Amino acid sequence: MLLLTVLLLVALVPLVRLTGGSIGTHAGGGGLDSGAPTAELESVEVFGTVRFSQAPVTLELGQGDDASGLRKFEFPDTEHDFEFSTSSGGCDVVLSARWPDQTAPIAIEITVEPDGVESLSRTIWAEGQVDEIIGFTWK
């Protein structure tokens, strides 16, 4: 019996060293952290373009859901480029624009080109004004 106990302890020592534990304690430590480094989300540069079939009178563009961080354009044209960083597999483009009254429906094309991912486009329509959050996702 003593010989069996000694053999069991000899086999247990290498196992304890491999798992990083110690004899008589729980290797997990009681917490949810496995000890493995957590993977941080990688930041992705996103380049984009917004195109209008008719130039708006006012234009504000932003990213995310924070309307206070919108970039205002002094003299809007029919095409504007933008860029920002995001740390997720998608982004929201915030668009606010106005046209004169009695304007025909306006086509608006928003294109985003995340670094390392194919470009994505969406087309929306507006009459007189638009206040939209346009969502894009990628893998």
Image (tube, rainbow, N blue to C red):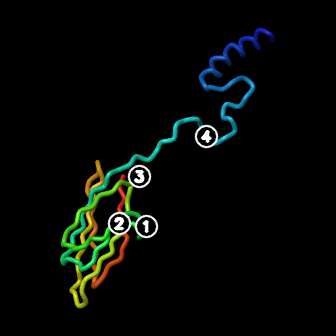
**10 Å crowding of disc 2: few (<14), some (14-19), many (20+):** many
Q: Position of residue 40 (x, y in %)?
A: 46, 44
Between 11 and 126, the one lying in front of the other is 126
Task: Please report whichever mark, 3 or 1, sits nearer to the chain's N-terminal start.
Answer: 1
Mark 1 residue type: Asp
Identify the secondary structure beneath mark 1. loop
Q: Quadrant of residue 52?
A: bottom left
Element at badge 3? loop
Where disc 4 sits, the SS reads: loop
Disc 2, disc 4: CB below 8 Å? no
Give the residue number, with chain letter if any, for mark 2.
62
First in sequence: mark 4 vs mark 3: 4
Q: Which residue is mark 4?
A: 33
Q: Residue at x 80, y 10 (%)?
A: 2
Q: Which residue is mark 3?
A: 87
User: Image height check: is 32 above or below 22?
Assistant: below
Closer to us: mark 1 or mark 4? Answer: 1
**Mark carried by residue 66:** 1
- Labels 2 and 3: the sequence-earlier one: 2
The residue lying furthest to the right in this view is 1
The residue at the point 23 percent across, 83 percent down is 105
Q: For marks 3 and 1, give the one nearer the viewer.
A: 1
How far apart marks 2 and 3 lie (CA) works out to 16 Å
The disc, 1 or 4, on the residue closer to the chain's N-terminal end is: 4
